Image: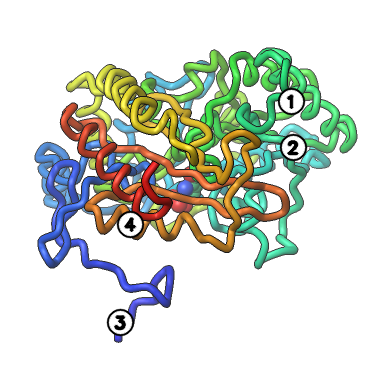
Amino acid sequence: MSHVFHRHLKQRYPTAVKGDGPYLVDAEGRRYLDASGGAAVSCLGHSDGEVIEAIRDQVGRLAYAHTSFFTNEPMETLADFLVERAPEGLSSVYFVSGGSEAVEAALKLARQYFIEIGQPQRRHLIARRQSYHGNTLGALATGGNAWRRQQFEPLLVEVSHVSPCYAYRGQAAGETPEAYGERLAHELENEILRLGPESVMAFVAEPVVGATLGAVPAVPGYFRRVREVCDRHGVLLILDEVMCGMGRTGSLFAAEQEGVSADLITIAKGLGGGYQPIGATLVSERIRRAIAEGSGFFQHGHTYIGHATACAAALAVQRAIEERDLLSRVRWLGEGLRERLLDRFGDHPHVGDIRGRGLFQGLELVADRADKTPFAPSRKLNAAIKRAAMEAGLMCYPMGGTIDGQRGDHILLAPPFILEESHLDELVDKLDTALARVMGDH
Ligand code: PMP
């Protein structure tokens, strides 16, 4: 019996023993094309020589130095690198070990900011339904994914949830994308007014929704309107780019394509590309200054913040992406993936929607395309697809189930940026095989 407390205690997992570019290899020698980058993590694939060398080099000199005693070179250089390329106004970076920690740091920075500037009554958060912001308690309370929250409710942090920007199901017949975005911005504004603007701290959203909806970008103009609403009421905007950031959608930050900046942006997954665990919260100058000129101390230390080896790995990953011009590769590979998905599944009776941006693409599965009826959760479609895909030698990221009226099964694709075009064909073929095995031929 395994002594590991696995995620699913009734499931057996193959043992991953080796990474080979975009493939993972198990102990039996089976190869899996990593079409989801794990969970949108492995942007450079699994065996990048330059990153491995950078890690070796850093460990050889300094693996780790606690940040209450020292700063370190990779952390300083990585912060410079990110701030130089970040959306306007973000001027410093708080390094943590993963996405949930980055979100927790953002929430507490927002809270501390308002305490420092003498508005301690601002502590209410607004986020969106069908969003995911992490599994720690604050991040879990922020996310609006009913399935992940349900068994832990009531949660410790109270958060209001408004509608996600989810055109496939949310945009009314005859409504333009602009009108839809405006309607949602009104909904947010009404919620701020209902709570009392002087009590609202921040609005949190993923620019492109990942884990709960499968790569859903907002309609054009939505985030600009959201930014205006937040500004009108003194509410901070926190963009969670843990999944969609770091080049995944074809720009380093997903927010760039929305034409907005934020007061806080969280990043993780693609930051270190899986070579080391690392996340970060980018902080606006306004927030940094309020804390620097106030108490001067963010009461939020973790043991591994600014881990030298993790920062060196992330720096190597980000430099590789830039030096190899991988963002333009993400854009054209993304187009190629999209074309192939539309070609293969565009008429599939159970594929209701194909959406996404760059190498962040999603398929929504439905029992009936005409009225978008979802599959019954009892079918456990996501688990079946994951199994069938693994049997076909493919890692994809299916999720779903209907709960509290939040509906739908989705498959998220987020492959490494280093694919060749032949891998796109392999990906679509294997996905087709897996879907046929679970839902029959179409
Ligand atoms: N925010 C978003 C948008 C995410 O997708 C995730 C992870 N799927 C998290 C936060 C949490 O990140 P982690 O699993 O690294 O804690």
Packing grade of label 1 (10 A; few <14, some 14-19, many >=20) is: many
Residue 95 place in picture, x, y as percent: 42, 43
The residues bearing labels 2 and 4 have C-alpha atoms spaced at a distance of: 35 Å
Q: Amino acid at mark 2?
A: Val
Tell me how far mark 1 sits from mark 3, CA to CA. 48 Å
**Which residue in the protein does label 4 denote?**
388
Label 3 to label 4, Cα distance in Å?
A: 24 Å
Q: Earlier in the sequence, mark 2 or mark 4?
A: 2
Q: Distance between the Cα atoms at labels 4 and 1? A: 38 Å
Please state which amino acid type lies under the numbered disc 1.
Answer: Leu
State if disc 2 and disc 1 touch (CB < 8 Å): yes
- Which residue is disc 3 drawn over? 2
Question: What residue do we see at 54% from left, 56% from top?
Answer: 135
Q: Are marks 2 and 4 in contact (CB under 8 Å)?
A: no
In this picture, is 428 found above or below 332?
A: below
Q: Earlier in the sequence, mark 1 or mark 3?
A: 3
